[in-house]
Image (cartoon, grey):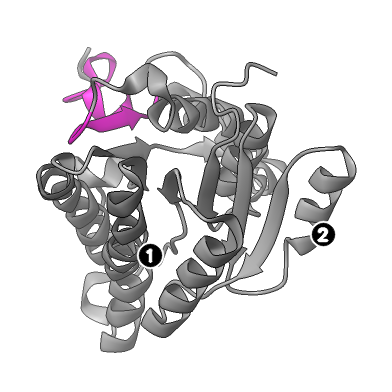
Amino acid sequence: MDLLLKDKIVIVTGGCSGIGWGITQRCVKSGATVIACQRSENGADRIADLVSQGYNAEFMRADVSDPESIVNFVANVHSKYGRIDALVNNAGITIECDFFEMSLEKLDMLWATNQRSVFLMSQAVARHMKEQGGGHIVNVSSNHSVASVAGYEMYAATKGGISSMTKAMAWSLGKHNIRVNTLSPGLTMTEAVQQVAVEKPHLVKPFNDMHATGQVSSVEDIANVATFLISEMSNAITGTDVVADQGVAAQLVRTDDLV
């Protein structure tokens, strides 16, 4: 245990699955008390297991696509713990859809869950951070914010919006000693991606070959970056987009295909 986050109160949205679950585990092992929220009760058992191991964690249900749910969730966290030191806006959904088939319903769902929620959650939490003298916010975006593929137009738009919004938030909140950064992972070996690899083993090599390092990031890799960004180790960093994708977005073209 490195105790980078000793005694810190940290909110992780979508904190019981995927990258969020990795961040929750890394934060509690670094000494933080983590309040992990999800839309459903799924994941509550995972938090209970962390508590049984002696870590400080709590599950609270919240639907980040619902503004009222956000307000109530943040009020409950602050009422119970008296402060909020860090917020990781990780909750989000992925919808891949043919350009001509994207419905208004899907579009609105992506915007409300991925982008609007980040603003509203940050706004609610930052009110308390301002009063307590500071804090750290990490908005989880995606490397789709800098390069994307067909069928991900609206997903990429929400992630690009997060990255752009973070830059403005850094200036709005910097005067209150609140740092705001974006963490943009690429393909990450979450449980869902692991399942794809099991069901379609022929994709494992192409997945690895996409990356400059020849490997897909683990959930722990991304969690380490998130922990760094909400720790005092990164006090000089705000308004920055940290693209953690093993070099995928850095490549202009695959030159070996041109030989």
Give the camera-side residue of 198 and 184: 184
Q: Quadrant of residue 30?
A: top right
Residue 115: % across, % down: 28, 64
Residue denoted by label 2 = 45
The answer to whether residue 102 is visible is: no
Secondary element type, mark 2: helix
Q: Which residues are magenta?
A: 238-257
Kind of residue sitting beneath label 2:
Asp
The answer to whether residue 51 is visible is: yes
- Earlier sequence position, callout 2 versus callout 1: 2
Q: What residue is rendered at 45% in x and 52% in y?
A: 90
- Compared with 258, 24 (above or below) is below
Q: What residue is rendered at 28% in x and 14% in y?
A: 256
Residue denoted by label 1 = 96
> Which part of the image, by quadrant, shows the N terminus?
top right
Q: CA distance from mark 2 to mark 1?
A: 30 Å
Does 197 sit left or right of 136 as displayed? Answer: right
Kind of residue sitting beneath label 1:
Glu
